[in-house]
Image (tube, rainbow, N blue to C red):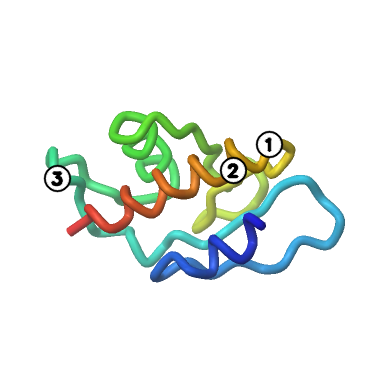
Amino acid sequence: LMYRQLLDIPGFKCPKPDGAFYMLPDVSMYFGMSTPSGAEISNANDFCIALLREEGVALVPGEAFGANKCVRLSYAASEDLINESLRRLTRFVASLK
């Protein structure tokens, strides 16, 4: 469910998980962009902070897992929560300029 939806988000590249409970999509396409409120996205940490502020979705920067261009999403959640979170994530990236 999450994998298919992530691949539908423009710019996201995500390896298919191999038995884990999380995904690490590459969000580096959005580095150098900014939010409507003017927050600049320079790295995965900025991406996570801006997403939390703008849409109330908490992700973990991939830096802690050796993946500097990625963010970590857990799919150990209900379908409803996954769908809503990815809807908000999609809206967030669409708002970046």
Along the line of sight, which residue is nearer the eye, 16 or 65?
A: 16
> Badges 2 and 1: C-beta atoms under 8 Å apart?
yes
Going by the numbered disc 1, the residue's amino acid type is Ser
Task: Name, please, the residue furthest toward the front.
Answer: 80
Q: How many marks?
A: 3
Q: How many neighbours does mark 2 have within 10 angstroms: few (below 14), some (14-19), or many (20 or more)? A: some
Q: Position of residue 81 (x, y in %)?
A: 58, 36
Which residue is found at the position 68% from the left and 36% from the top?
Answer: 78
Q: Position of residue 54 (x, y in %)?
A: 29, 34
Label placed on residue 78: 1
Please tell me which of labels 3 and 1 falls first in the chain.
3
Q: Position of residue 8 (x, y in %)?
A: 48, 69
Q: CA distance from mark 3 to mark 1?
A: 30 Å
Going by the numbered disc 3, the residue's amino acid type is Pro
Kindly state the secondary structure of the residue where label 3 is placed: loop
Going by the numbered disc 2, the residue's amino acid type is Ile
Q: How many neighbours does mark 1 have within 10 angstroms: few (below 14), some (14-19), or many (20 or more)? A: few
Kindly state the secondary structure of the residue where label 2 is placed: helix
Which of the 4 image quarters holds residue 30?
bottom left
Label placed on residue 82: 2
Q: Is residue 44 left or right of residue 55?
A: right
User: In the image, which is nearer the foreground, mark 3 or mark 2?
Assistant: 2
Which residue is found at the position 14% from the left and 45% from the top?
Answer: 36
Task: Name, please, the residue furthest toward the right.
Answer: 19
User: Circle 3 is placed at which residue position?
Assistant: 36
> Badges 3 and 1: C-beta atoms under 8 Å apart?
no
Which residue is found at the position 61% from the left and 66% from the top?
Answer: 4
Q: In the image, is residue 73 above or below residue 7?
A: above
Q: Position of residue 84 (x, y in %)?
A: 49, 41
Q: In the image, is residue 28 above or below residue 82?
A: below
Q: In the image, is residue 76 above or below residue 40?
A: above
User: In the image, which is nearer the foreground, mark 3 or mark 1?
Assistant: 1
